[in-house]
Image (spheres, grey):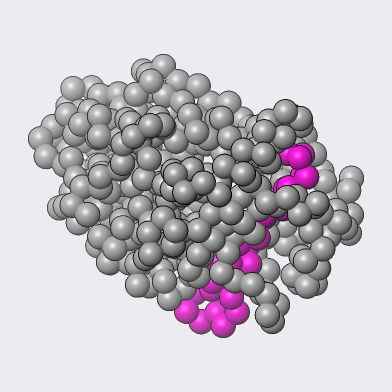
Amino acid sequence: MPESVAIVGAGVAGAAAAIRLAERGVAVDLYEAVPEPKPIGAGLLLQPTGQRVLTAMGLLDEALALGTRVDRLFGDTPSGRAVLDMSYRRFHPEAYGLGIQRGALMGMLWKRVRELGVRWHCGALVEGFEQDEAGVTLRLSGGAKARHAALILANGSFSRLREGMKVSQHARAFPWGAVWTVLPAPPGFPQIELRQRFRSASQMIGLMPVGRADHADGARGINLFWSLPVAELEGWRERVGLDRIKQQMAELFPDVLPLLAGLRDAGQLREARYADVHMARWHDGRVLAIGDCAHGMSPQLGQGANMALIDAHELASEVGGDWPGVFERYGRRRRAHLRFYGQASKGLTPMFQSHAVVAPWLRDRFFGWGGRLPYVHQQSIAVLAGYKTGWLWGRLKLAGC
């Protein structure tokens, strides 16, 4: 019987799972389709729950050295109406978000993967798999095959391998996406909060301090996020152009002008697309889906990397016995937490990215006024921090933390 576990995808979920399993003595083979993996993606906001996982991995100190602590999330409209005003410290005196560049986080994770001796197969495209009672056989591009005791899918929201699992599932692409970049922070530019400006739900700009890309980088960055319908993402450079996009940003939020001086080429802006992924359960025998592959959601709650780290940590806590049993126990452990955030993401997204009229009107009045009430503020920050497991009650309890 094969002893090693295969993980497909070397993003946050896949790399973190490889680390946590290897630390438990599990032999791991990590498969990545890209010959030379490079971190691509927007800056990340790591919540207190995800920070606890990094602490357990011994990586939080390095993450703090590279990233930037975020104390507050503030969003308003052009008229000055406050929509969001949430302080981590009002939730807990020592709580904060951690803005970090994806490249910095992935560099830390990939370094640890190599230190642990995980077998990393770069340029190895997994095209399919078959499982039986004794293990899982991977079908690789070029006709090669590989045999493993179990398979963990961590290759993102748009995974085609997930369709091979005999589990009721659906993945729906969001009609809204974004363009984003990381720009050098101008002198004196605020770097203590995640700042957003909304015009209804059809326009949104987001600014978040994300620190340095690596230890040699002296410049601290600001992640710039500009919401766009997916239909407008296609060919936006030729149809709209960089100058017009920058003009729209400045019209919505004039304070962004000093930052936009660093945006000189349309190639600096990358496109982001998202999908809502729902699965009746996340395991099928010896196959398990984690991260965005299992529960992709919109970026509104800032939970993507956070959930990926938690998935990896909780999976490792269940290691012992046969793999189908491990995966089933993991599913029970994660169910309440993931179901809550899936529902919350689906409910909140139309309030921030849509052509809706009523939803953003309710957002402006409920979040702005209601957020000043201590109980509502506490519950809102608990959601943002990644602790909620139910609408009325329930808090996440991380194994061993």
Q: Position of residue 245 (x, y in %)?
A: 84, 54
Quadrant assignment, res 281: top left
Quadrant the C terminus occupies: bottom left
Q: Relative to residue 311, is residue 334 depicted above or below?
A: above
* Viewer-closest of 141 and 155: 155
Question: Where does residue 398 sit, x and y in percent of width and height?
Answer: 25, 47
State left or right for residue 181 relative to residue 68: right
Q: Residue placed at 36% from the left, 45% from the top?
A: 387
Q: Can I make out residue 183 in this image?
A: yes
Please state which of residues 91 and 232 is positioned toward the viewer in this rendering: 91
What is the x, y in percent for residue 8?
39, 42
The N terminus: image quadrant: top left
- In reply to whether residue 220 is colored magenta, the answer given is yes
Residue 290 screen position, x and y as percent: 37, 38
Q: Is residue 401 left or right of residue 102?
A: left
Name the residue furthest left: 321
Judging depth in this view, the residue of 254 and 81 nearest the camera is 81
Is residue 384 in the magenta section?
A: no
Using the rendered image of the protein, determine whether residue 40 is visible from the camera's viewpoint.
no
Q: Residue at x 51, y 65 (%)?
A: 70
Relative horizontal placement of residue 268, taking residue 191 as reference (left or right)? right
At horizontal 25% and vertical 29% (from top left) the residue drawn is 332
For the record, the magenta segment spans 196-223
- Residue at 78% from the left image edge and 45% from the top image edge: 199
Front one among 236 and 31: 236
Residue 269, quarter of picture: bottom right
Q: How many discs appear?
A: 0
Residue 89 drawn above or below residue 142: below
